[in-house]
Image (tube, helix red, strand yellow):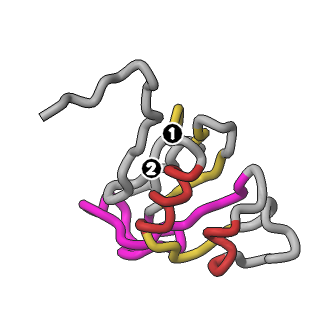
Amino acid sequence: MRSKLNKRIVCADGFGMSVQGNENAYCTPRVNGAEAYTQVEIGFPSEKESLIMPWCELPEEPTETVYGYVPVSVVVNVIAKHGGMVSGEVPPGVARLEPVNEKQQIPEG
């Protein structure tokens, strides 16, 4: 079975990165089609992001490298920090946070 590559995500503020989980990625579990991943691989972020620097393979070139075994919770925090996802795909187990529409009303109650 061939590894499925997720489309690069783009966040509301323009920040982008690749988020992968498959047998060829630095992830847990390291298999194709897992029900949920607990750690994933991030690749080639559009700018240096302090939240993921502890996992950076080449710290001197933070936008030209991969970040292995990044906890899913960190990935979700990065997406939230940048306003939510407007496009792209994340592996199972990574919450797909979408931008909050300012026109949406929170129900009272």
Q: CA distance from mark 1 to mark 2?
A: 10 Å
Query: Can you say whether 55 is above or below 93 in the image?
Result: below
In what quadrant of the picture does the C terminus appear?
top left
Residue 35 image point, x, y percent: 24, 60
At horizontal 55% and vertical 66% (from top left) the residue drawn is 41
Viewer-nearest residue: 102 or 52: 102
Farthest top residue in view: 103
Q: Which residue is identified by label 1? A: 85
Kindly check if marks 1 and 2 are in contact, taking CB atoms under 8 A apart as contact: yes
Say whether residue 7 is magenta: no
Residue 48 quadrant: bottom right
Say whether residue 39 is magenta: yes
Residue range highlighted in magenta: 22-45
Q: Image check: 109 left or right of 90?
A: left
Labels 1 and 2: the sequence-earlier one: 1
Viewer-nearest residue: 73 or 7: 73
- Around disc 2, counting alpha carbons within 10 Å, would you say few (fewer than 14), some (14 to 19), or many (20 or more)? many
At horizontal 75% and vertical 66% (from top left) the residue drawn is 65
Residue 81 image point, x, y percent: 56, 52
Residue 42 quadrant: bottom right
Farthest right residue in view: 60
Q: On residue 90, which mark appears?
A: 2
The amino acid sitting under disc 2 is: Val
Farthest left residue in view: 109
Farthest front residue in view: 109
